[in-house]
Image: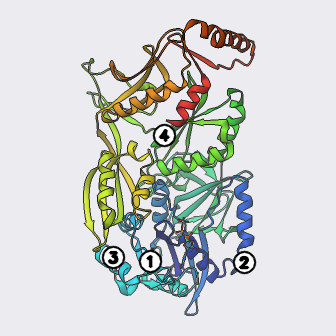
Amino acid sequence: IPLERFRNFCIVAHVDHGKSTLSDRLLELTGTIEKGNNKQILDKLDVERERGITVKAQTCTMLYKHKGQDYLFNLVDTPGHVDFRAEVMSSFRSSDSAILLVDASQGVQAQTVANFFLAFAQGLQLIPVLNKIDLPSSDPERALDQMKTHFEIDPESAVSVSAKTGHNVDCILPAVIEQTTPPTGSSEKPLKMLLVDSWYDTYKGVILLVRIFDGVLKPGDNIYSFGTKKKYQIQEVGIMYPLETSTRSLRAGQIGYCYPGMKNVSDAKIGDSFTTVGMEDEVEACEGFEEPKPMVFVGAYPADQGDFNRLDDSIRQLVTNDRSVTLEKESSQALGQGWRMGFLGTLHASVFQDRLRQEHGGALIITAPTVPYMLRYADGREVIISNPAEFPDGEGHHTARPDRLEPYVLATITLPEEYLGKVIELCESNRGVQEELTFWTSQQVILKYKLPLAQLVSDFFGKLKGISKGYASLDYEDAGYEKSDIVRLQLLVNKEPVDAICQVMHRSMTQYAGKQWVSKFKEFVQRELFEVVIQAAVGNKIVARETVKAVRKDVTAKLYGGDRTRRMKLLEKQKDGRKKLQSIGRVTIEQKSFQGFLSKT
Ligand code: GTP
């Protein structure tokens, strides 16, 4: 099939607008999967998933006959997940056009807006498709009107379908053929290819999904990565049809897979470019490659330190399959040895936490998510701090006190007008700054707020859904670091800092958080022969305080004293060196208490 009859496209849509259903219909229509009988393939995918392999079911090559001629389509999957910006961008870069899929009963939503502008900026040709027209509540006119007013999309070019019943789905591919142009590029030129996606196979190692812009890729070729400067020899190439199907070569304009004999998933950097070894000075890398940075951190500790090795293996396994998670060992005085994991964003972090809980349940203590902060020194040096323990405590004593900055995001929220007041209140109470307020239609509003990422991690999304009865939708993008009055809140017990309990936050939050900390921590402190003072402090300034009164002597002797020394002796006998009790300012606190405190705050 000549290049003129290639079309590379992706589907952009808000979550639940029907992307998966439509992809399945298109695969059936082109005979790539059997109609109503994709069970086989799905089963195979399930098995592979169980083996811990991420399979991108919806990146696929399709063959299609139109007006007597064969066409070759490549449908590239785009993650519906706002955190995976790098993946979204590289799937846009690998495509020449995009189907802008909108649920006709809901109209344009936050992710539709965000994706539209990203795709538009990328120069993609857009085909509007309205879905779910079988629903009585569907209002294609309104959705088309929104797209016309705000995206300047010609309603004439739109296709209205029901992905569920299949109605009119056969009009989509002809529309793609007629409304979009084929890829450009030349198989005669030196190789230039883009890494779109990757996954891991236990037997074959890392598999790359690539878009060939120029040149030809065949087994035996030696390739060079612009991102990592490493070299690989191609072992196999092929297309996703819908599973890996080997071919003799991949040429300009095509999207397919290859095995480069790569061992580490972390070497497969989404958005990276490759060429043939020796051509690195002739060929220019594709634009826009950015390495994603972890923006949300979560700590995890075994409930029982004896479990550390077992959990370490299994957490490593999980991380191997998700190249966007960073993992480091961490140890805390109160919780022992554990891990610190970095995620791309809040949704990414919560999905991964759910998986950890599912697999390990009570065996893991997972701490509240935190974001990285930045210190900027007078000489321009910038230091990112993701561990609160490393955040400087000094409150203005140093002449060279660095500026403190925190990460912000620009949130796009779409909502029905009746919830506007409440949503604005939510944003404002989360230190948001309004950037834009537009009425799409008389009932639909689009709001843009600059918000600190730290506010987003504390269930902002859940609250937004709650106050809007699920009607508001949210998307956000990175908006860089900004100066902010952030400080470290520290818990003290009888004036001694408790290492494990400190957190970096905005000064306006410290009073509230401090009160919560001390009253909650009080529950976990045993009464002693002396008074125990629990305080929350910012530097030298105490923001909250609770006191645990001393117990009378006779009671202690009977109930606590003996009991505790006996326990201490028993503990000493334990040869595995587990540390169960912590002494802070002569106060003894059980590790269980720390676990209870930290897993709930
Ligand atoms: P994510 O994978 O979560 O991003 O969602 P998606 O956009 O892929 O949507 P999906 O295809 O999973 O569809 C979401 C829901 O809408 C499912 O319950 C589908 O059955 C339903 N749905 C999809 N297309 C139609 C349609 O044309 N009509 C009706 N009535 N329902 C549809």
The residue identified by callout 2 is 37
Residue 486 location (% of width, % of height) = 32, 33
The quadrant in which the N terminus is found is: bottom right
Badge nearest the viewer, 2 or 3: 3
Q: Is residue 524 left or right of residue 467?
A: right
Question: Which image quadrant shows ligand 1?
Answer: bottom right
Structural distance between the alpha carbons of marks 2 and 3: 37 Å
The residue identified by callout 4 is 369
Instruction: Classify mark 1: residues with Cα within 10 Å, few (<14), some (14-19) or many (20+).
Output: many
Q: Earlier in the sequence, mark 3 or mark 4?
A: 3
Amino acid at pointer 4: Pro
Q: Earlier in the sequence, mark 1 or mark 2?
A: 2
Structural distance between the alpha carbons of marks 1 and 2: 29 Å
Say above or below: 34 vs 201: below
Which residue is at the front of the view, 281 or 213? 213
Q: Earlier in the sequence, mark 1 or mark 4?
A: 1
Marker disc for residue 254 = none
In this orientation, does residue 514 appear?
Answer: yes
Instruction: Classify mark 3: residues with Cα within 10 Å, few (<14), some (14-19) or many (20+).
Output: some
Amino acid at pointer 3: Gln
Badge nearest the viewer, 4 or 2: 4
The residue identified by callout 3 is 146
The residue identified by callout 1 is 105
Which residue is at the front of the view, 454 or 119? 454
Structural distance between the alpha carbons of marks 4 and 2: 43 Å
Q: Do the numbered discs 1 and 2 sit on residues whose CB atoms are within 8 Å?
A: no
Residue at position x 67%, y 27% from top?
Answer: 305
Q: Secondary structure at mark 3?
A: helix
Amino acid at pointer 1: Ser
Q: Secondary structure at mark 4?
A: loop
User: Toward which corner of the image does residue 159 lie, by quadrant?
Assistant: bottom left
Amino acid at pointer 2: Asn
